[in-house]
Amino acid sequence: MLFENILKDLPGKPGFQEFQYEDINPLSKRQKIRTLFNPNEAMRVVHARLLVYLRSLNGISEFSTGSVKGSSAVRNVQAHSQNRFIYVLDLKDAYEHVECKGMSEILYELDPKLNKEETQQFLLTYCFRTLGMGLIMGAPASPDLFNIYASVLIDQPIRSLTEKHRLTYTRYLDDLTFSSKEEPIGKIKRRTTRRVIESAGFAISHHKSRIFDLEKEPAVINGIGLELGGRTFLPRHYLKRLRGLLYTGIARPGDKKLRAKIGGMMGLFNHLTNTQQPNKTEETILELWNKYKR
C-alpha cells in the first residue's frame, strides 16, 4: 500500500536523464568527473513522497551530520573542536557499494509492516542502478537512503569502538572523522575501524586517509581547517577562489548563477571568519564583497 500511494497520480512516467558533471568541491578543492542522473518531474514526485516516509522512520544515527536537517560541514568539524588527535577516512565511491537487497532488509527492520519483495522491487526500479548495486547519484532520496544504510552497517558497529576508547566520531555522508582528547589514535584502533568499514561492504580511499596532531599542525576536515583550541578557518585555496569569483562577479553583475555561488561561499566565509579582525586576504574579500553588493 505504501508504494502504491507513492506512485499514485504521477504527472507522467518517472525517469532519469544521465549526464556527466565535473564536480569541484570549493572546500576540499577535489575535482572528479561524476555520472549523475537528473530526475524528471514524475520521478521528483516519487522521491519527494519517499523522503517523507524515510524521515518518519528516524533511521539515521546521531553520528550522521551530512544531508541531515540542522547539521552542516561546519558543525561536523566543530564536534571535534575540543580534541587534539584527529583521524579522517573517506569511503571510495560510497553510493556504488550500497546493495539494494541489504537496503530493503534494513527498511524492513525499521518498519516490519513492509513487504520485503515489494520494497526491494520498488528500490530497484526507482532508487538503484542496474542489477541492484549502487544508489543513483542525483536522485533526491539517495542521501537519506545512504545515511540509513550506513547508520546500521557502519555507525552501529563503530559505536562500541568509540565508547571503549573514548573517541568522538562523526560521519559526514562518506567522510568519517574520529578524534581523541588525550590519546593518539594508534594503528590497532585504525585497523579495527577499517575492518568495520570493509565488513560492511565498503572500500576506503586510503590515499585520502589522514592522521593529525593539532599540537603539530592544523587538521583539514571536509575542507574546513581546525586548530588546537577549536578555531575553525577556511583554507587558502577557498579564499583564493572566492576572491576570483568576486572579481568576476563585479565584471558580470547580471550573472544570477554566479551571484548564487558567491552568496553561498560568502555565507560560509562570514560564518568562519572574524570579520572584526580580518587578515589581509580576508580584508580584501570583504572589500570586494561590499563593492559587489552595490
Image (cartoon, rainbow, N blue to C red):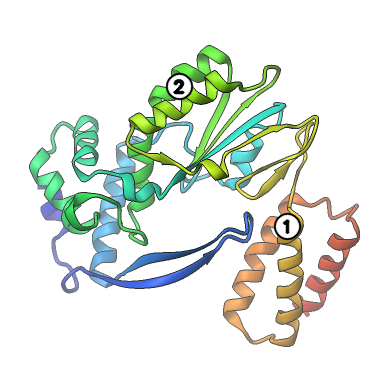
Locate residue 31, reporting x and y percent: 55, 62
Residue appearing at x 64%, y 56% in the figure: 27
* Amino acid marked by disc 2: Arg
Figure quadrant of residue 251:
bottom right
Residue 164 drawn above or below residue 42: above
Seen as rendered, the residue at the extreme top is 164
Residue appearing at x 11%, y 38% in the figure: 116
Instruction: Judge the density around disc 1: few (<14), some (14-19), many (≥20) Cα neighbours within 10 Å.
Output: many
User: What residue sits right under mark 2 in the picture?
Assistant: 159
| Mark 2 residue element | helix
* Amino acid marked by disc 1: Phe
Locate residue 124, reporting x and y percent: 17, 53
Q: CA distance from mark 1 to mark 2?
A: 33 Å
Figure quadrant of residue 279:
bottom right
| Mark 1 residue element | helix
Instruction: Judge the density around disc 2: few (<14), some (14-19), many (≥20) Cα neighbours within 10 Å.
Output: some
Determine if residue 173 is in view. Answer: no
Residue appearing at x 57%, y 22% in the figure: 187
Residue 90 in the figure: left or right of residue 272: left
Q: Nearer the viewer, residue 50 or 285?
A: 285
Mark 1 vs mark 2, foreground winner is: 2
Residue 65 in the figure: left or right of residue 79: left
Q: Nearer the viewer, residue 93 or 82?
A: 93
Residue 193 drawn above or below residue 247: above
Locate residue 208, reporting x and y percent: 56, 44
Residue 104 drawn above or below residue 142: above
Determine if residue 49 is in view. Answer: yes
User: What residue sits right under mark 1 in the picture?
Assistant: 269
Q: Are marks 1 and 2 in contact (CB under 8 Å)?
A: no
